[in-house]
Image (spheres, rainbow, N blue to C red):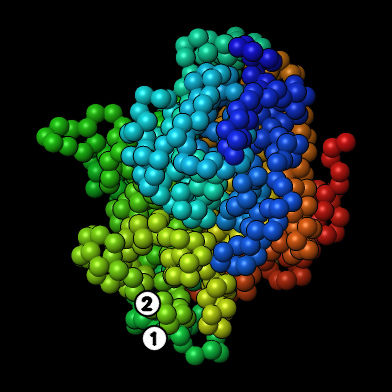
């Protein structure tokens, strides 16, 4: 039992039934390990083969929409998995993947988290965790090597993720949820290392549904010594080559190695791809909302508020929204490699003076020290009408402490600001909320107006949101179900077409890259199993504006999706791929596992895993009487509302509706699916 069963794989999963408290080690066949490649691929296979979801899950009614809420049922499994790269010295391999049914979208989600969690879990002797059921009381899961136990932790109820990590210090890596996860906020996230989030899809709510506050993992020196690879020398050679490639990029001045993604507002705004004022624009210019295409015949529910662009379009100061400006304001900030071992070190944090002494090393549980990355700068910045990366820091900190996804948080707040300015919010909700604490110009209880351009709004609104009761009929209780559910409820109550103001696919909020500014981007969102994710596909060359057909991009789209499944199964950080070419990754796989496979072989296996997740989604939709091809659609704004300014002025996500339909059918054909988007059988 103590040793690894296969080269590159412990060959076992820790299965935890929270309803009964039973814990067992379950063996995974070697064929599954090689066919799934670990990480996302193996987790998807285990999810499908071991799915514990009961028929009663389909009886649950969503507390806001009244629709399906299968994800909330205790029988829904929650998986945390590692890949063959974890527990090795491969650069940028400090990753783990969470796979489950998304509480936000009710379909398949895979979301990734940095830090050392993945390393410790694999070094302890586990390919992953499979958790189902719901504990009668709040508990935490404590793992050390091959021993695991559930520990009552009512004393941690309501604790922030930072407080939870501090309370459990000494037990290894901590992966916990804050108040938002406990409350079942549908875009809450589990957090590790203070700031590393499994961000997308609301997986933190799964912890809350199961009354699981935290997972801690530690691996003894003896357990780490049992990590098993087929050819240690070949692996060392491959790692050396990768480090040399990374060194070349750093010496060449690759800006990513100094700024991470925080310089992206320059590019995104120039190319009409940066969310601005809830995606009413994408170039950093807040438009006059009265001039946008969205319209309503219903009378205003509340008086329209004076917005930041009421008197005319307002251009945000985009350079101040970038990491360049952040570093100018924080001259003592240093790069750090949170995801050990990582030569890229894309993270940066200030080194402030606390009680007369400058902080040494990476600060973890301190506010206003972390440099936000692009998606956060965009969704909690330009999307809310803010112009400075310094203003985004407080909202970012709130998400980290309370355990919230910065992307969906920004989407939710931006939607309310737009609806308030239009006068579309229900009268009983009004257009203000009381400040939960003193912050900025507000004292506790002061009324904060829902409007773009207020830097104090995000941290105050997120604090109120984190403790909301989902489905209680209040504004925050409705918003806690996510932007799409909120818009649908506003539409039901007022008659205003609020759903036209959302930006999503399959219910997953857009990840800060507007498809109306890039040909083929919309199709990538539509065909991803999780919905709107920019991390599930990519094109090698610029594709231009969506004024021409995207049909020619379909083969490359499928190829890139398969390649990313390989990367996410091994598991390697996306930002290391440039220094880790395909052949190198295949050589690393062979050195670790002893399985001689080419890159093309691995991509073929990835196609099978892609179809498995699709089949899981299709089975769910079929049970609900919904058509798969109807689910593969972008929200109205992205399909019908042209961008008002910038290089993509007048563009929507496709050249026309005919091209959209043709591209989707061509994609289905390329995958070998039928015209309704249903895949063939991929497993006997």
Marker disc for residue 447:
none
**Quadrant position of residue 433:** bottom left
| Residue at point 43%, 52% (across, down) | 180
Determine whether, in the image, residue 353 is placed left or right of residue 223.
Answer: left
Q: Relative to the observer, which residue lies in front, 275 or 431?
A: 431
Q: Are marks 2 and 1 in contact (CB under 8 Å)?
A: yes
Which quarter of the rendering shows the C terminus?
top right
Q: How many marks?
A: 2
| Residue 611 visible here | yes
SS for callout 1: loop
Residue 108, compared with residue 578, is above or below; it is below
Which quarter of the rendering shows the N terminus?
top right
* Residue 664 in picture, x, y percent from top left: 76, 59
| Residue 128 visible here | no
Residue 593, compared with residue 443, is above or below; it is above
Q: Earlier in the sequence, mark 2 or mark 1?
A: 1
Q: Relative to the observer, which residue lies in front, 310 or 158?
A: 158
* Residue 225 in picture, x, y percent from top left: 53, 10
Task: Say which residue label 2 marks.
Answer: 431
Residue 201, compared with residue 355, is above or below; it is below
Determine whether, in the image, residue 249 is placed left or right of residue 41.
Answer: left
Task: Say which residue label 1 marks.
Answer: 303
Binning the other alpha carbons within 10 Å of mark 2 as few (below 14), some (14 to 19) or many (20 upward) gives many
Determine whether, in the image, residue 245 is placed left or right of residue 612.
Answer: left
* Residue 393 in picture, x, y percent from top left: 32, 51
CA distance separating discs 2 and 1:
8 Å
List the single residue furthest toward the left: 356
**Quadrant position of residue 31:** top right
Q: Relative to the observer, which residue lies in front, 398 or 60?
A: 60
Q: Relative to the observer, which residue lies in front, 331 or 628?
A: 628
SS for callout 2: loop
Binning the other alpha carbons within 10 Å of mark 1 as few (below 14), some (14 to 19) or many (20 upward) gives some
């Amino acid at each position: 039992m103590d040793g690894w069963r296969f080269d590159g794989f412990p060959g076992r999963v820790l299965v935890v039934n929270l309803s009964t408290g039973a814990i067992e080690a379950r063996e995974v066949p070697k064929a599954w390990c090689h066919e799934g490649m670990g990480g996302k691929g193996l987790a998807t296979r285990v999810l499908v083969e071991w799915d514990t979801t009961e028929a009663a899950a389909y009886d649950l009614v969503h507390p806001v929409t009244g629709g399906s809420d299968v994800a909330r049922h205790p029988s829904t499994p929650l998986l945390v998995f590692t890949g063959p790269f974890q527990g090795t010295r491969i650069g940028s391999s400090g990753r783990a993947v969470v796979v489950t049914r998304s509480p936000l979208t009710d379909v398949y989600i895979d979301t990734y988290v940095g830090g050392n969690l993945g390393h410790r879990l694999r070094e302890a002797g586990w390919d992953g965790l499979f958790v189902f059921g719901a504990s009668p009381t709040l508990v935490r899961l404590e793992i050390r090597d091959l021993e695991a136990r559930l520990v009552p932790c009512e004393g941690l109820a309501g604790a922030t993720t930072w407080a939870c990590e501090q309370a459990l210090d000494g037990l290894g890596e901590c992966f916990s949820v804050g108040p938002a996860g406990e409350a079942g906020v549908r875009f809450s996230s589990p957090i590790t290392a203070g700031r590393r989030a499994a961000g997308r899809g609301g997986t933190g709510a799964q912890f809350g549904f199961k009354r699981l506050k935290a997972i801690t993992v530690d691996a003894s020196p003896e357990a780490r010594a049992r990590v098993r690879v087929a050819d240690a020398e070949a692996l060392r050679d491959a790692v050396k080559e990768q480090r040399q490639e990374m060194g070349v990029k750093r010496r060449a001045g690759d800006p990513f190695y100094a700024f991470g993604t925080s310089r992206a507002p320059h590019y995104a705004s120039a190319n009409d791809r940066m969310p601005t004022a809830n995606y009413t624009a994408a170039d950093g210019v807040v438009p006059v909302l009265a001039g946008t295409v969205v319209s309503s015949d219903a009378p205003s529910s509340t008086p329209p508020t004076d917005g930041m662009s009421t008197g005319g379009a307002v251009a945000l100061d985009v350079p101040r929204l970038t990491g360049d400006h952040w570093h100018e304001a924080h001259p003592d900030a240093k790069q750090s490699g949170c995801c050990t071992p990582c030569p890229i070190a894309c993270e940066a944090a200030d080194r402030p003076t606390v009680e007369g002494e400058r902080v040494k090393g990476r600060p973890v549980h301190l506010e206003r020290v972390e440099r936000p990355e692009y998606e956060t700068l965009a969704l909690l910045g330009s999307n809310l009408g803010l112009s400075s990366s310094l203003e985004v820091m407080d909202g970012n900190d709130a998400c980290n402490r309370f355990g919230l996804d910065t992307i969906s948080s920004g989407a939710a707040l931006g939607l309310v600001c737009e609806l308030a300015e239009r006068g579309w919010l229900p009268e009983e909700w009004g257009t203000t909320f009381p400040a939960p604490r003193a912050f900025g110009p507000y004292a506790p209880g002061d009324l904060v107006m829902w409007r773009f351009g207020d830097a104090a709004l995000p941290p105050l609104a997120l604090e109120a949101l984190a403790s909301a009761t989902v489905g209680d009929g209040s504004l925050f209780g409705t918003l806690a179900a996510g932007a799409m559910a909120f818009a649908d409820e506003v539409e039901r109550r007022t008659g205003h077409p609020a759903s036209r103001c959302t930006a999503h696919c399959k219910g997953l909020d857009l990840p800060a890259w507007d498809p109306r500014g890039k040909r083929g981007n919309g199709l990538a969102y539509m065909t991803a199993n999780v919905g709107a994710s920019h991390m599930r596909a990519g094109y090698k060359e610029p594709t231009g504006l969506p004024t021409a057909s995207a049909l020619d991009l379909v083969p490359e789209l499928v190829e890139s999706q398969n390649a990313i499944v390989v990367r996410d199964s091994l598991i390697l950080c996306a930002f290391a791929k440039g220094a880790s070419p395909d052949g190198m990754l295949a050589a690393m796989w062979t050195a670790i596992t002893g399985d001689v496979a080419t890159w093309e072989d691995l991509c073929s296996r990835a196609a099978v895993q892609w179809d498995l997740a699709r089949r899981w989604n299709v089975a769910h939709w079929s049970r609900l009487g919904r058509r798969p091809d109807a689910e593969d659609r972008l929200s109205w704004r992205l399909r019908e509302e042209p961008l008002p300014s910038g290089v993509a002025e007048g563009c929507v996500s496709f050249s026309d509706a005919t091209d959209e339909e043709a591209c989707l059918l061509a994609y289905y054909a390329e995958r070998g699916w039928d015209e309704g988007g249903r895949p063939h059988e991929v497993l006997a």
